[in-house]
Amino acid sequence: MQHEGNNAKAPRRSNKGEYAPHDDHGDAIEPGLRVPNSSLDSCGKSFVAANGNRIKTPGDHFSDTGVIAAVCQHDRVIVYASMWTPGEQQFYAFALIDAVMAELPEHWQVGILYDIGCQIHRSALKWDLLPQWMPHIIFAISVFHTYGHQWVCQLWYHPQKGDVWGLTDGEGCERLWSDL
Ligand SMILES: [Zn+2]
């Protein structure tokens, strides 16, 4: 759904009933996504994790600047990795996804909840990352973080608006950090 201004016209739909990409007002919905670029841009600007340039830990005193983890639905750690950059960069998430997916049966459909699920979904498609896994992955946003996203982003990435998540909230890492 997009703001159409005074010359409102019905959004174009593809044969699949999804909104087709169009470039009115310089905005567009990229193939494979359902959220317009303008909303994804706003999401990206509003999140610390999406801003890899934001320095959380100065790297000049520590070789490791943090730890990142992937946990399962039951909050058990599957993969830990050291971070070595001052900020949280998206490549850590892709590295963890790659490590986890490599251990799973190839026919599994895997749901991944992340604070900035919309951003890594966009990056994966834009840069053709993890092409072997993408057909098996569904992205969503951890439930406490969804409310910080644009409303149109919430419509597609809020786990309680999807039919595959049940009550899974994607906040297992927050509970892990709290336990630690
Ligand atoms: Zn978003």
Image: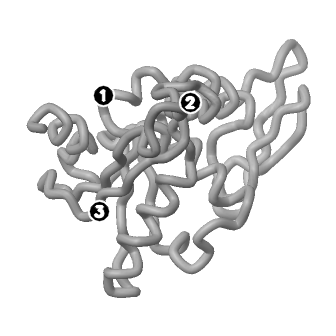
Q: Residues within 10 Å of mark 3 (few under 14, many from 20)?
A: some
Is mark 3 in CB contact (under 8 Å) with mark 2? no
Any mark on residue 79, and which?
3
Q: Residue at x 47, y 32 (%)?
A: 61
The residue at which mark 1 appears reads as: 144
In this figure, what is the number of numbered marks? 3
Quadrant of the rendering where the N terminus is positioned: top right
Q: Earlier in the sequence, mark 1 or mark 3?
A: 3
Q: Residue at x 39, y 38 (%)?
A: 158
In terms of secondary structure, where does tag 2 sit? helix
Q: If the image is split into quadrants, where does the C terminus sit?
A: top left
Residues at marks 2 and 1, CA–CA distance in whole angstroms:
16 Å
Q: Earlier in the sequence, mark 3 or mark 2?
A: 3
The residue at label 3 has a CB less than 8 Å from ligand 1: no
Tell us which disc is closer to us: 3 or 2. Answer: 3
Q: CA distance from mark 3 to mark 2?
A: 31 Å
Task: Give the residue displayed 33% in from the left and 81% down from the top.
Answer: 103
Query: Cβ of disc 2 within 8 Å of ligand 1?
Result: no
Which residue position holds label 2? 152
Residue type indicated by callout 3: Val
